[in-house]
Image (cartoon, rainbow, N blue to C red):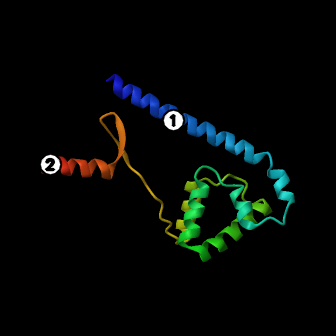
Amino acid sequence: MSEDDSELERLKAKRLAEMQQNISTRKKIETPLANSQSKTTKNPRDVLVGRLGFRGLEVLQNAESQFPNDTTMVVEKLAELITSGEITEILDGGKLLALFRSIGLNIRMETKINVEQDGKFVSLSDKLSNKSSDESD
């Protein structure tokens, strides 16, 4: 029972650290926003990257590698909306991915599922391959 409690506490602490990092990132981005809006000669991608939050850059990079032409048009339009002030919020990875999927671009993201085995976290594929090799013995 105490192992479950300690695992839960560890997960809570990890999530709290992620949320604090996200908040500090937002504060760092929001302070130079007034200065960045005066510079209109910026590259549209740079304008968008300045507004991306948690895992937003990862989604953008995947989109650029999978759909380069379509992503360029989306980035230009988003940068235009950001500079005009219509988009004022931070775009995290989930929001950006939802945007791409809503316009028909199914961006594939790498996903990992880890499970606990003997006190260590291993990938699900490793666990399944070990289980199948144990059964064949």
- The label on residue 135 is 2
- Farthest front residue in view: 137
At 70% from the left and 61% from the top, the residue drawn is: 48
Provide residue 28's location: percent of width, then percent of height.
74, 44
- The label on residue 14 is 1
Q: Callout 2: 10 Å neighbours few (<14), some, many (20+)?
A: few
Provide residue 103's location: percent of width, then percent of height.
56, 71
- Farthest bottom residue in view: 69
Residue type, label 2: Glu
Say what secondary structure mark 2 lies in.
helix
Q: Which mark is first along the chain, 2 or 1? A: 1
Residue type, label 1: Lys
Residues 109 and 79: in front is 109
- Farthest right residue in view: 38
Left or right relative to 58: residue 36: right
Provide residue 105's location: percent of width, then percent of height.
53, 71
Q: Callout 1: 10 Å neighbours few (<14), some, many (20+)?
A: few
| Marks 1/2: CA–CA distance | 35 Å
Q: Which quadrant: the N terminus? A: top left
Residues 126 and 13: in front is 126
> Tags 1 and 2 in contact by the CB under 8 Å rule?
no
In the image, residue 59 above or below residue 137:
below
At 55% from the left and 55% from the top, the residue drawn is: 94
At 74% from the left and 48% from the top, the residue drawn is: 29
